[in-house]
Amino acid sequence: KMRIGISLSELARKTHNKTGRDIVDDLVTVFFELSCLHSIEILGIPHVTGPTSDKDDSLILNELSDRGLSMTVLGDLSPGALKTAVSSCDVHIGARMHSNIAALSSSTPVIALSYSHKTAGIMQEFDLNDLVLNLGHFDSHDLNTLLSHAIASKEQISQTISQRLEATIQRSYSNFDLIDTFFQTTETGVGQET
């Protein structure tokens, strides 16, 4: 079976619903249409589970599951277990930026459901601008089209991510060099009069 991961939040629902659309309805429609074409397993991955119920992603994921989808919703997991779950997917649909980062850092194709410029920026870093849907500005047809594209191109998308990931890691290491240089400069200047 093809595994599709989904990370969703109440904030994503509120943002999407401002335009009169219901993200749960849109996702249910897409997943039912997809299951007619492919043998799929849907994995609900709650990225945040508290501290209050309005922050608990498992509630909206269980609501999605309760609509008749063949879906498994995971429980409260450690960060490592969350990343393992995301990386086990053929395609991940993420409304949580850090779940999208987990997908990208494991070369898992991701469709980002965005309500922030930060998500778009991260996807642009990996040359995946075409895999971003702005919450409130898409419907089930748009998501279905993009998900079908991601499934058909998953090896190519994964390869693109892998190529960009190496450069991103190297740039992040340069931050350590900058910090080291800063502290060396600061230490040499301690106790000296200018």
Image: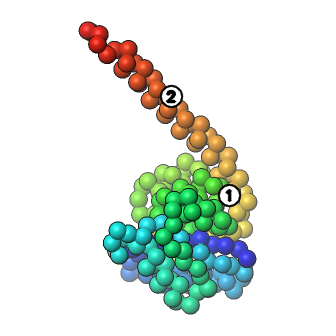
Q: Is residue 33 above or below residue 74?
A: below
Residue that sits furthest to the top in the current view: 193
Q: Residue at x 51, y 88 (%)?
A: 66
Q: Residues within 10 Å of mark 2 (few under 14, many from 20)?
A: few
> Residue 37 location in percent, x, y?
72, 82
List x then y, in percent, for residue 175.
49, 34
In the rendered image, residue 192, in percent from the top left (x then y), is placed at: 29, 10
Q: Can you tell which quarter of the image residue 29 is in? A: bottom right
Q: Image height check: is 158 above or below 65?
A: above
Whole-angstrom CA distance, mark 2 to mark 1, is 31 Å
Q: Which mark is residue 22?
A: none
Helix, strand or loop at disc 2?
A: helix
Q: Amino acid at mark 1?
A: Ile
| Disc 2 residue type (three-letter) | Asp
Please provide percent x and percent y for residue 5: 59, 71
Depth check, mark 2 against mark 1: the one in front is 2
Q: Out of 147 and 84, give the one closest to the viewer.
A: 84
Q: Quadrant of residue 55?
A: bottom left
Residue placed furthest toward the left:
193
**Can the viewer see residue 27?**
yes
Looking at the image, which residue is at 50% across and 28% down?
A: 177
Can you tell which mark lies on residue 177?
A: 2
Q: How is the image coloured?
A: rainbow
First in sequence: mark 2 vs mark 1: 1
Residue at 58%, 86% (x, y): give it.
69
Under circle 1, the secondary element is: helix
Q: Which residue is mark 1?
A: 157
